[in-house]
Image (cartoon, grey):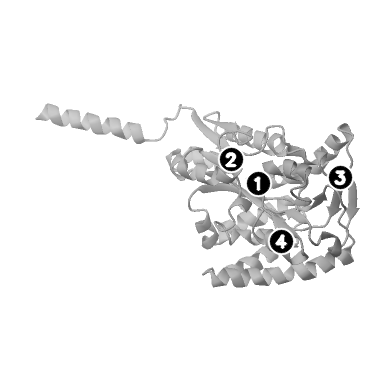
Amino acid sequence: MKKRNLLKLAGFAGLALLFSGPSAGQVIKLTLTDQNPPTAWGSLQAMDPWVKKVEEATKGRVKIQVYYSQTLSKGPDAWNAVKTGVADICWCFHGYWPDMTPLSDVITLPFLPISKAEKGSEVLWKLYEKFPAIQREFRDAKPIMLWTTDPYFLITSKKQIKTLEDIKGMKIRVPGGPPSEQMKALGAIPMAIPMPGNYEALDKGTIDGMGAPWEPLHGFRLYEVVRYYTMVPLYAAYFSMSFNVQKWDSLPKDIQQAIMSVSGLEGSKFWGRNFFDTAEQGVRELVKKANKQIIQYDMPPQEVARWRKIAGDPLWKEWVKRMESKGRPEAQQVLSSTLELLKQ
């Protein structure tokens, strides 16, 4: 009987070891799914440096294998991939799933006073920390960073947009959520196409143009199929770096703390700054090398005001009403906090 009990105890001990976290000296290998190519500006300036920061912060105990160019999951499938454990971490573009994180979409409202991605990223992370309702939107994964783009502007292949009248009837790719409503209000036809498909869509004329920050012009070589750049600050988009919940919970506490030491608020600002705010320089260098052309039009303030009057403030109010009608009473407070944080 004693021997049998000892065997049971040994079995329980073995199971405990099997399901416990990694030992102190063990290297933890993590997989990360990303839709961007490895040569993209954001990959070189943000992803690679951040992966290195994680490895240094954990003293080599964590190694992250990045699967670029949708080789582990397609961009629109990234959230489900991390939720189900296909990937340990995802680079996630939340424009693919606007119904999943609708309060977070506040940061994408047209004509918000966002001038730099670093500031937008700071505000989005602070909103996440402040509002439990926003935290619940991410409950299927563990976000360790949230960041935004700098303001999107318009790029077109065959015609320069200079006035409100010019955009009417044009097929414009948008990232989903409030930007779709903005294009409708402006008289354009919003088109939802994943970013990796936009080169072909522009080249074949499936779309006439799109809203974009500078980074995807570099990463997806969009500068090859567009000529006209209209500088009007339309909206921002947002992203997360998110962990599979079970994988995160299995990590030792000191490893979690080390990862968060290069993530969280400062990591979010780092990603906004390095991924987006610095990208214009890289695009202009590529354009020059490829002997391509940037025909840039800086929209005058009075014309921007026309656009904002139709597709700015009115859409903020509509968004609040829509969120409240869907059982999210925090919407006005979230919007007010966003505007206040952007002023700071």
The residue depicted at 66 percent of the width and 57 percent of the height is 123
Residue identifier under label 1: 194
Q: Gap between marks 2 and 3, in whole Å?
A: 28 Å
Residue identifier under label 3: 227
Element marked by disc 1: loop
Residue identifier under label 2: 74
Specify whether residue 251 is in view.
yes
N-term mark: 2 or 4: 2
The residue depicted at 82 percent of the width and 49 percent of the height is 156
10 Å crowding of disc 1: few (<14), some (14-19), many (20+): some
Specify whether residue 343 is in view.
no
10 Å crowding of disc 2: few (<14), some (14-19), many (20+): some
Amino acid on which the number 4 mark rests in the picture? Leu
Mark 2 touching mark 1, by CB under 8 A? yes
Amino acid on which the number 1 mark rests in the picture? Pro
N-term mark: 4 or 1: 1
Element marked by disc 4: helix
Q: Position of residue 118 (x, y in %)?
A: 72, 50
N-term mark: 3 or 1: 1
Mark 2 touching mark 3, by CB under 8 A? no
Q: Quadrant of residue 6?
A: top left
Q: Gap between marks 4 and 1, in whole Å?
A: 29 Å
